[in-house]
Image (cartoon, helix red, strand yellow):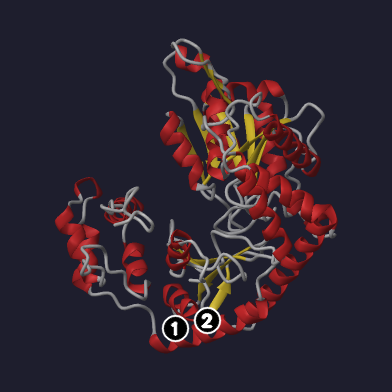
Amino acid sequence: MSEHQHPVLARLEELQRGDLPTHGGRTLAYVYDAGLPEVDRVARAAVAAYAATNGLDPTAFPSVLVMENEVVGATCDLLDAPASAVGTVTSGGTESVLLAVQAARDARPDLAAAGLRPRMVVPSTIHAAFHKAAHYFGVETVVVPVGPDFRADVAATRAAVAADADRTVLVAVSAPSYAHGVVDPVAEVAAIAAEHGVRCHVDACIGGWVLPYAARLGRAVPPWTFAVPGVTSISVDLHKYAYAPKGTSVLLHRDAGLRRPQFFAEADWPGYTMLNTTMQSTKSGGPLAGAWAVLRTIGDAGYLELTRTVLDGVDRLVAGLADLPGLDLVAAPDSTLVAVAADGSCDVFTVADELAVDGWLAQPQLSYAGQPPTLHLSLSAATDVAGLLVALRRAVEAARAAGPVALDADVVGFVQALDPATLDDAALDGLLAAVGMGADADGGLALPERMGEVNALLDVASPALREALLSAFLDRLSRPVRGGGPGSGPGSGR
């Protein structure tokens, strides 16, 4: 701590030393780094300047409304939106998806009046946020398969919509899908939706600020924007490849009528009339100001160059993987996301552990519907691809030498015999201990340095059991630390 540093800020620095780095391009999920220090400086200043403002009432802080309208307008311009288009800045991609599903549901009050459950049709590769929305809003999810290219199956989508078109309120596709990095056949799916008078949402949260520039660079990008007839809404995250601070996303609708069911108003109580455009009421102007500042700092030409940089990096990574025994590219990426699988000589969970030794985070994705587990790599403009390839080669060599994770047969049998509906503390304690995650000296969880065995155990569990185990694990992690409230910190005199 420097001589003049506030002790609370010093404590924050100390806490952050255990976090993954948000800059440098080595954290290949969760964060996105442009590698431009000036952008980071401007963003932080803008967030701080607006941290205390509240977007709940645009008449109280009109500058927040000005920034939101300008950010939405820039997004409209980028995504070929018609003059009638409108949009809203949300807290992130999940909230944008939730609102798209909620608006589609609430646009059909006739279904609720008739006691019918609304439904939406999605490919199996759609982001889990859609399943969360279905859970929250009582919407039936009809999941259709994808083809061998991991793109939504058009014929299966057509059949699923036609099977009960009157109850279908939404069809959704990805640009690109998170797990495999490919763009769905948006034009074909949107045409099916339009034929039946159904909304079509494009989840472009992770690709929406990259794909338009990729097309301008001459890369082959399947059509997916509002230029496609039948597309009624699009979500795109600014805190991903617009390189804005967390958390900002934009949800666009083709016209105001489509957006109107998204709004919530309540006047039947003695307080102020609540009027919300998003799921939030109080909305700090900080993230919005940060996004507005970053968009203006980088500019159109800057985003074009950042996209050129990151996609050139994707090309180099794909070429390097072709010469790397042990890993196979799952699908030719349409954007910045790359998924790789092991060829049998090693396992991706050990590869991820070995990458972590060298300071790289690669996100394991568990097996699904007969597909093997994979590693998810989200590249950024700041990613040193040459360094990543060196780390991958060393990690694969170490993983091949060690061999795949060997699980105790009794532990595997114990896991597979668990009932997700009746998972209790005793069973969880046994599993945690088996993988080196028992209680530490302070009563918290002692996390192992390597997660390969944990991931391998989760991989043999059913999706329902994975959900139950990880929910129980999260519950264990999320416990209060007492005695640290106001008055107990530095400067309190204690």
Residue found at x 33% / y 49%: 487
Does the rendering let one see residue 334? no
Q: Which residue is mark 2?
A: 326
The location of residue 303, given as percent across then percent down, is: 78, 57
Question: Toward which corner of the image does residue 220 lie, by quadrant?
Answer: bottom right
Front residue of this view, candidates 402 and 246: 246
Q: Which residue is mark 1?
A: 399
Q: Is residue 42 above or below residue 27?
A: above
Front residue of this view, candidates 139 and 494: 494
Secondary structure under the numbered disc 1 in the rendered image: helix
Q: Answer left or right for 348 relative to 421.
A: right
Q: Answer left or right for 5 relative to 175.
A: left
For label 1, the crowd category at 10 Å Cα-Cα, with few meaning under 14, some 14 to 19 and many 20 or more, is many
Q: CA distance from mark 2 to mark 1?
A: 9 Å
Front residue of this view, candidates 313 and 185: 313
Ranked by sequence position, the earlier of labels 2 and 1 is 2
Q: Residue furthest left?
A: 426
The location of residue 386, given as percent across then percent down, is: 67, 81
Q: Answer left or right for 315 relative to 490.
A: right
Q: Viewer-nearest of labels 2 and 1?
A: 1
Type of the residue with mark 2 = Gly
The location of residue 268, given as percent across then percent down, is: 46, 10
Secondary structure under the numbered disc 2 in the rendered image: loop
Total numbered labels placed on residues in the image? 2
Mark 2 near mark 1, Cβ–Cβ under 8 Å? yes
Type of the residue with mark 1 = Ala
Q: Answer left or right for 473 relative to 136.
A: left
Quarter of the image with the C terminus in it: bottom left
Does the rendering let one see residue 162? yes
